[in-house]
Amino acid sequence: MDELVIGVVSGLVASLVIFVLHAVYLSAIRPWMEDRVYKDARIEGRWCITYPGMPDVEEQVTLKRTAHKVTGQINSSKGPDAGKIYDIEGTFRNLLLTLTYTSSDRSALDRGAFVLQLNDNGASFFGRSSYYYNEDHSIADAECKWRRIGG
């Protein structure tokens, strides 16, 4: 009977060790290795979003990047959404940035997406945004331009 208990306990301990090592690999080691071999442009930092069709709207973006994964926040500074904050996540590969955003306020329904291409030797993104338009309860899209703030 002792051998059975020892076998079960050792199996549980081995499973726990493998589970912990797998979690550490996925959360720390793998992103570190991917970042070391990352060959795309460095897009992390601050950006300003403008919409040519909506001159009264302006937003500030802070991007963080680990390998191809991108996260960050959008702060609306001008326009009907002034003062609102959105969380963003997505990927950047082959000069294309695809992002989804959701309102940081969990009671708000605001959400949408961006598909952008890096231009001007890494100084700007150009593309489109799609979003929920509250006035007529539809999905709308808009052309947008991001320009890098600072260096």
Image (spheres, rainbow, N blue to C red):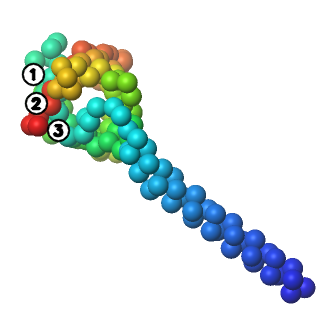
Q: Nearer the viewer, residue 101 or 43?
A: 43
Provide residue 102's location: percent of width, then percent of height: 34, 37
Task: Using the numbered discs, state the Cα–Cα distance from disc 1 to disc 3 in whole angstroms.
Answer: 20 Å
Task: Using the numbered discs, state the Cα–Cα distance from disc 2 to disc 1 in whole angstroms.
Answer: 6 Å
- Find out whether the residues at labels 2 and 1 contact each other: C-beta distance under 8 Å: yes
Task: Using the numbered discs, state the Cα–Cα distance from disc 2 to disc 3 in whole angstroms.
Answer: 17 Å
Residue at the limit of the structure toward the top, as seen here: 53
In the rendered image, which residue does mark 3 sit on? 46
The amino acid pointed to by label 3 is Arg
When the figure is inspected, residue 139 is found, relative to residue 46, above or below; the finding is above
Task: Say the numbered circle drawn on residue 56.
Answer: 1
Provide residue 64's location: percent of width, then percent of height: 28, 43
In the rendered image, which residue does mark 2 sit on? 78
Provide residue 89's location: percent of width, then percent of height: 36, 38
When the figure is inspected, residue 8 is found, relative to residue 50, above or below; the finding is below
The amino acid pointed to by label 2 is Lys
Say which label, 2 or 3, has the lower sequence index.
3
Q: Give the quadrant of residue 101.
A: top left
Q: Nearer the viewer, residue 67 or 87?
A: 67
Task: State which quarter of the image contains the N terminus.
Answer: bottom right
Q: In this image, 124 relative to 8: left or right?
A: left
Residue at the limit of the structure toward the bottom, as seen here: 2
Q: In this image, 26 relative to 83: left or right?
A: right
Q: Residue at x 75, y 78 (%)?
A: 9
Say which label, 1 or 3, has the lower sequence index.
3
When the figure is inspected, residue 147 is found, relative to residue 85, above or below; the finding is above
Q: Residue at x 10, y 18 (%)?
A: 55
Judged from the image, the secondary structure of the residue bearing numbered disc 3 is: strand
